[in-house]
Image: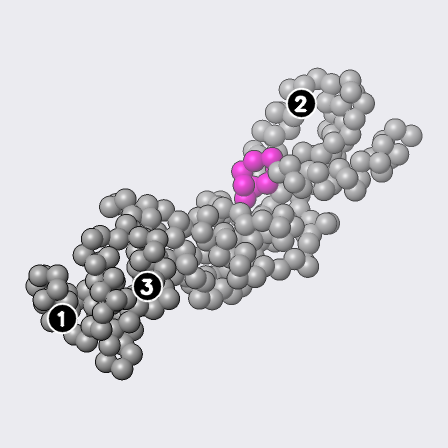
Amino acid sequence: MDKVINRLRARLLENPVVEIKETAWWSVPITVFDTSFTRVKRSKMDILMKMMMIAFQQTDIRRAANLTEMLLVDELFISDLMEKMQRWGQVRVEKSIFKLTKKGREQLESGIMEEEVDAENSELFYSATHDAFLPETKNDFEKKCPFYRYVDTEKRVDDQRILQVLSEQENRLDENGFQTIVSDVHHFEERTVQYAPCLEFQLYNKEQDIFYARVWNTWLERWDDKLEKQIEEKERVEWREKWME
């Protein structure tokens, strides 16, 4: 950590009108969430699937052979597709007749297929002090620090916030160009709390006659403007009274 301090001090003091008044180490708690979620794969509906759905909507279909006669497609292939459509929630059997579900009707109207893929797991890292989810860090923190004096322990997250973050992180295109999106969060729970050491500099610019803070967040490996703003809003007046008397 001494190397970090010396490097940052040298960077700040490159400007000769800047003075470092005080420095301090403290840490911000980061809550680690374990999450389980489901994604769906979206793709454009092909002609055969569309014709099958129209048939289910307009005709009483009791078995694959009925569609085979109508569409002139191999019965085993039709039967396999019907099983998948049931599994995907596009059709259901009512009194021995295959009927489109609400989901099936919506997909037929939009022309977009949605296929569920296996459940997945992910870790999320939440800082209540920032009220934000932070990226996973590569750092291995060993330094023990007191807690940040303005640490926030009140903010909580719900499943909608988790879904939003997972969607931002996990939505993607697969190797075939199909879009896969997060559709549902099965559960999320707090697993542990980690701590991100931060190095605070309280500074004075003689030329501009202003006091300000710089905070190096070792989790993010950059200056943390959100924490800097919090400190300045609460303490800048006190610094002037303290150091300009």
What numbered label is drawn on residue 66? Answer: 1
From the viewer's perspective, tell me whether residue 19 is left or right of residue 74.
Answer: right
Name the front one of labels 2 and 3: 3
What residue is shown with label 2?
Answer: 13
Q: Which residues are magenta?
A: 215-223
Q: Amino acid at mark 2?
A: Leu
In front here: 187 or 98? 98
Mark 2 or 1 closer to N-term? 2
Q: Amino acid at mark 1?
A: Asn
Magenta-drawn stretch contains 216:
yes
Name the front one of labels 3 and 1: 1
Q: Secondary structure at mark 1?
A: helix
Using the image, determine if residue 237 lies above or below residue 116: above
The reply to whether residue 124 is in sight is: no
Q: CA distance from mark 3 to mark 1?
A: 19 Å
Using the image, determine if residue 44 lies above or below residue 75: above
Q: Residue at x 34, y 68 (%)?
A: 101
Q: Residue at x 45, y 62 (%)?
A: 185
Q: Amino acid at mark 3?
A: Gly
